[in-house]
């Protein structure tokens, strides 16, 4: 990958409230990577419409996710923040990649199976094709690194397979045109730390998710201090005190989840949290977790609320980001068209 300029891309769907899982699994990583990489962060509204959306709510959600990015510390001037539908090249490259990827590859995607459930014949074709659009999102910027939560690992592997097949299928043209060994980098997933898969507060075996009908299953970035405290107090646990060693968390998914959240919020590790809280009962540990969560999240929630009041400001950030993203995406599409043999 030496020939590719390191570049980070990632996206968040504007579908409902952002939660602690989105924050710890993705957004905190976005913020940290700004120090070392050129970053492109996208509000992926084209992905959102793979399931029905109400137009007014979608619009509000796009602005809310943008506000969350900014409130969490993403610098939209140094880096790029925009919404996907403003850069048509995402959809254009997705069509090309539809013709590169194989049906069998998509049929293996577990997220589609989970989301489609028994109603498979009735869901949108977009929901099925979602991972191809995701590959296009990344590859249209020839991004080399993609910070995501654990749930996106399989989609990232697919993006790598697609990039590799494109490079192989068009190897001769790619080399004649001076792109070296491959036109697309094989994007690397960045999935690290103690909270790559934050679980529901009601069931430690289920992912914390926007679509869970119970609001008590998740902590939203917009929750106030009282709501956060209430949700953590009610979080499911078991009767044993916390163990002192990591091994003691085995088969205790709820305990492991809360310890992971604590570690991620204070930027330590599960082992360090257990060193401090081993032998302590949940009521004491939950009090410490409430204090930490409130201290970390409520300033972000407040900043989000203020930012969303200024719609014109948010829209200007998105417009400016889209203009800069478009230049990069158009460069890629021009090269892709030449490689494919299109006249332009
Ligand atoms: N529970 C989670 N733990 C860690 N990371 C998570 N992410 C999502 N849930 C967790 C990561 O957040 C980023 C943005 O996610 P998204 O909004 O694009 O999509 P999503 O995974 O569909 O979000 P939800 O909340 O899980 O929605 P539903 O309810 O529709 O399934 C991604 O990097 C994701 O990995």
Image (cartoon, rainbow, N blue to C red):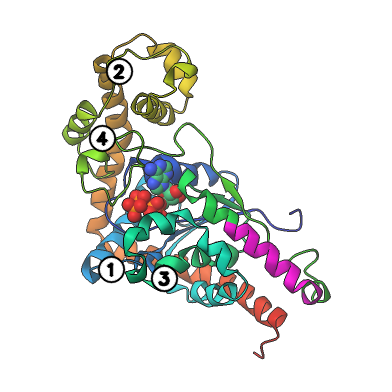
Identify the disc placed on residue 52: 1
Count of marks, rendered view: 4
- Tell me, yes or no, whether the two marked residues, 4 and 3, touch with CB atoms within 8 Å: no
Residues drawn in magenta: 158-173
Q: CA distance from mark 3 to mark 1?
A: 11 Å
Does any portion of residue 103 appear in the rendered image?
Answer: yes
- Tell me, yes or no, whether the two marked residues, 1 and 4, touch with CB atoms within 8 Å: no
Residue at 42% from the left image edge and 57% from the top image edge: 113
Q: Is residue 321 above or below residue 255?
A: below
Few, some or many residues within 10 Å of mark 4 (<14, 14–19, 20+): many
Q: CA distance from mark 1 to mark 2?
A: 40 Å
| Magenta highlight: main SS | helix
Q: CA distance from mark 2 to mark 4?
A: 17 Å
Q: Which residue is at the front of the view, 163 or 14?
A: 163
Q: CA distance from mark 1 to mark 4?
A: 26 Å
Mark 2 / mark 4, whichever is N-terminal: 4
Q: Which quadrant of the view contains residue 173?
A: bottom right
The percent coordinates of residue 169 (x first, y second) are 73, 72
Does any portion of residue 184 appear in the rendered image?
Answer: no
For label 4, the residue is: 202
- Tell me, yes or no, whether the two marked residues, 2 and 3, touch with CB atoms within 8 Å: no
Q: CA distance from mark 2 to mark 3?
A: 43 Å
Q: Is residue 286 above or below residue 54?
A: above
Local secondary structure at mark 2: helix
Q: Which residue is at the front of the view, 316 or 325?
A: 325
């Amino acid at each position: 990958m030496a020939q590719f300029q390191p570049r980070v891309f990632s996206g968040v769907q504007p579908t409902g409230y952002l939660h602690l899982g989105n924050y710890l699994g993705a957004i905190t990583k976005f913020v940290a990577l700004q120090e070392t990489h050129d970053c492109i962060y996208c509000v992926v509204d084209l992905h959102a419409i793979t399931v029905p959306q109400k137009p007014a709510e979608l619009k509000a959600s796009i602005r809310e996710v943008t506000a969350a990015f900014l409130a969490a510390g993403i610098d939209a001037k140094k880096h790029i923040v925009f919404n996907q539908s403003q850069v048509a090249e995402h959809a254009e490259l997705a069509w090309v990649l539809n013709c590169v990827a194989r049906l069998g590859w998509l049929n293996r995607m577990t997220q589609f199976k989970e989301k489609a459930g028994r109603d498979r014949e009735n869901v949108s074709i977009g929901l099925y094709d979602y991972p191809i659009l995701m590959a296009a999102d990344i590859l249209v910027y020839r991004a080399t690194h993609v910070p995501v939560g654990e749930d996106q690992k399989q989609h990232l592997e697919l993006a790598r397979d697609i990039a590799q097949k494109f490079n192989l299928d068009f190897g001769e043209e790619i080399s004649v045109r001076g792109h070296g060994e491959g036109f697309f980098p094989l994007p690397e997933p960045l999935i690290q730390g103690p909270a790559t898969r934050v679980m529901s507060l009601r069931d430690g075996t289920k992912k914390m998710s926007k679509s869970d009908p119970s609001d008590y299953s998740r902590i939203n970035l917009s929750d106030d201090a009282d709501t956060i405290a209430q949700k953590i107090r009610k979080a499911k646990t078991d009767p044993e005190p916390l163990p002192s060693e990591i091994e003691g968390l085995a088969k205790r998914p709820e305990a492991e989840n809360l310890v992971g959240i604590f570690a991620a919020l204070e930027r330590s590790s599960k082992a360090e949290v257990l060193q401090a809280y081993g032998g302590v009962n949940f009521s004491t540990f939950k009090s410490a977790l409430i204090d930490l969560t409130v201290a970390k999240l409520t300033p972000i929630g407040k900043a989000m609320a203020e930012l969303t009041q200024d719609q014109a400001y948010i829209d200007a950030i998105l417009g400016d980001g889209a203009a800069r993203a478009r230049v990069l995406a158009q460069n890629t599409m021009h090269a892709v068209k030449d490689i494919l043999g299109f006249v332009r």
